[in-house]
Amino acid sequence: MIDIIIHCTVALLLPPLLLGVITKTKAAFAGRIGAPLLQSYYDIFKLFRKGSVFSTTTTWVFRAGPLVTLAATVTAALLVPLGRHNAPLSFDGDMVLFAYLFGLGRFFTTAAALDTGSSFEGMGAAREVTFSCLAEPTLFIALITLARMSGSLRLSTILTYPSPGLWLATGASMLLLVAALFIILLAENCRIPFDDPTTHLELTMIHEVMVLDHSGPAFGVILYSAALKLLVLGAVFVNVALPVSTGDSLEDWGLFVVAMLALAVGIGVVESVMARLRLLRIPQLLVGATILSAFGMLLVLR
């Protein structure tokens, strides 16, 4: 019961802090002080206190988009184990539900963008769907490979099975999977080099263009859902890349939080030393990630 309470607390409170760490890291590389670490919390709370403006051309789909996305992401957060602890929700085959929960959220986000009747937001929705079609196979292949190693279809078993011993036995395969998962982590969360969440250049936006018409609490829900998605996919990456356990539950929770903060610093470093890719190069990198995960699976099945 204690682990479930800590799981829910970490899942609800930690996500905005990760965005603050990324922003601080990028500011440090640029020689600036940057916004406070807690700025994301302030922004979300401020949006919840504001009113919303809805276009007369929109329907219930536009209003439901952020809420369905948040519900899908919260459910995914309950399915994925944080650190070396089992998830609150677990059953055989939950890895399939986990992957398609993000698909459900993406569907309603793009549907809400199309519901505005704006050709500009339709362009962003088309890009989002196209790139997601190339990213999802990588995640599936990685999960299937880990499922083959662990002999289970439960995420709690799949993501807590990796250990230092497994790395020593199948290091090449694990390294390929970690590289593929990191690429997908950046792509699914619209981070550089795939997308720039702070850009204002219309022709280069992907995710941000789809939420331009949202305001007030709805936009706050979108920002929080994006931060929570970063935590969930980051937890998948950390469980595979850093399978360290002390044997003490509280210490393992502390290790997980530190690992997530270190991952946020790593993302900030990547965004500081790399530029955004041209749109024509993004599919090539996503296909490359799929190839990496496929080779990792072949090394396990050989």
Image: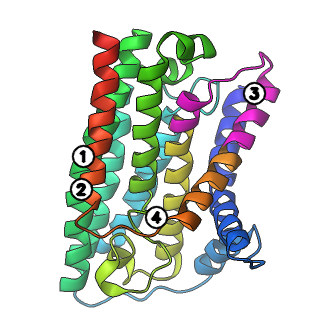
Q: Nearer the viewer, residue 19 or 241?
A: 241
Q: What separation in Å lies between label 4 and label 3 (alpha carbons)? A: 30 Å
Q: In this rendering, which labeled residue sits more in front, label 3 or label 2?
A: 2
Quadrant assignment, res 209? bottom left
Q: How many neighbours does mark 2 have within 10 angstroms: few (below 14), some (14-19), or many (20 or more)? A: some
In which quadrant is the N terminus drawn?
top right
- Report the amino acid beneath label 2: Pro
Q: Which residues are magenta?
A: 237-259
Identify the disc placed on residue 252.
3
Q: Sequence-wise, which precedes: disc 1 or disc 4?
A: 4
* Residue highlighted by disc 1: 287
Q: Is residue 68 magenta?
A: no
Q: Is residue 114 left or right of residue 257?
A: left
Identify the disc placed on residue 192.
4
- Report the amino acid beneath label 1: Val
Q: Is residue 240 left or right of residue 67?
A: right
**Cβ–Cβ under 8 Å for marks 1 and 2:** yes
Q: How many neighbours does mark 3 have within 10 angstroms: few (below 14), some (14-19), or many (20 or more)? A: some
Q: What separation in Å lies between label 1 and label 4 (alpha carbons)? A: 17 Å
**Which residue is found at the position 56% from the left and 20% from the top?**
160
| Label 4 residue SS | loop
Q: Sequence-wise, which precedes: disc 4 or disc 3?
A: 4
* Residue highlighted by disc 2: 283
